[in-house]
């Protein structure tokens, strides 16, 4: 059983996550959650911890940001849009059970102390920005690292905030492109 409480957006997400893992799940009910919900979540975080798993779309990212700002040290689980899409609908409820399980098991906390391990120069050196195919390379690495997709600036922030080491990144780069 997963110790942490998994936070998702809606009821359909709850069903899908519970089918993937033995865990407790709570839904925000969308973006309109209030102080009472956040207070409950803070108490849950204090007792058991929280993993945020929101839809990989604009609103899901906004909800994730609000939750992250309100909580002390949540973990973050990400699914790429490609694994959460059913026709034109993007959401956790559309993902395969094994993809949800993998995302939650890869959940990472943001580091309390920000350490700038990587810079924009590193992204350029690894061909992760400014070149044809950079977006695809970042997305493939994001999937392997479990840090969610984003533009170059977001990718760089996530590498640093989630404590990804240079060795970890280079190992995955080697596996993805030469393995």
Image: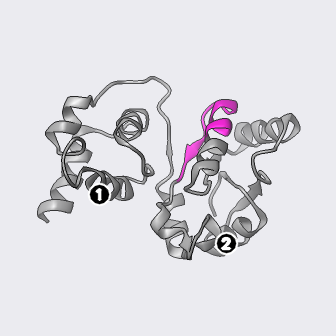
Residue 90: where, in percent of width, then height?
A: 59, 65
Q: Nearer the viewer, residue 156 or 24?
A: 156
Q: Is residue 21 above or below residue 118?
A: below
Quarter of the figure that contains the N terminus: bottom right
Q: Nearer the viewer, residue 76 or 135?
A: 135
Q: Is residue 65 above or below residue 119?
A: below
Q: Which stretch is magenta?
A: 65-77
| Badge 2 element | helix
Q: Is residue 73 magenta?
A: yes
| Badge 1 element | helix
Q: Say which residue label 1 marks.
A: 136
Residue 177 shown left or right of residue 41 in the figure = left
- Please name the residue shown 25% across and 46% down the image: 169
Q: Nearer the viewer, residue 3 or 14?
A: 14
Q: Nearer the viewer, mark 1 or mark 2?
A: 1
Residue 89: where, in percent of width, then height?
A: 61, 69
- Please name the residue shown 38% across and 58% down the image: 143
Q: Is residue 137 above or below residue 34?
A: below
Q: Say which residue label 2 marks.
A: 16
Q: Using a 10 Å C-alpha cutoff, classify the residue at mark 1 as few (fewer than 14 neighbours), some (14 to 19) or many (20 or more).
A: few
Which mark is drawn over residue 176? none
- Corner quadrant of residue 162: top left
User: What kind of colouring is applied to the model shown?
Assistant: one colour
């Amino acid at each position: 059983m997963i110790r942490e409480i998994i936070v998702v957006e809606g009821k359909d997400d709850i069903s899908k996550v519970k089918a993937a893992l033995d865990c407790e799940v709570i839904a925000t009910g969308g973006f309109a959650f209030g102080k009472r919900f956040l207070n409950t979540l803070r108490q849950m975080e204090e007792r058991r911890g929280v993993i945020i798993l929101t839809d990989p779309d604009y609103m899901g990212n906004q909800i994730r940001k609000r939750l992250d700002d309100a909580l002390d040290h949540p973990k973050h689980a990400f699914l790429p849009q490609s694994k959460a899409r059913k026709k034109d609908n993007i959401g956790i409820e559309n993902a395969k059970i094994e993809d949800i399980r993998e995302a939650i098991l890869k959940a990472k906390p943001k580091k309390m102390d920000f350490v700038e391990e990587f810079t924009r120069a590193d992204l350029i050196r690894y061909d992760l920005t400014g070149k044809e195919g950079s977006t695809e390379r970042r997305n493939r690495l994001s999937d392997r690292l479990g840090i969610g997709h984003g533009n170059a600036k977001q990718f760089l922030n996530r590498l640093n905030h989630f404590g990804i080491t240079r060795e970890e990144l280079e190992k995955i780069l080697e596996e993805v492109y030469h393995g």
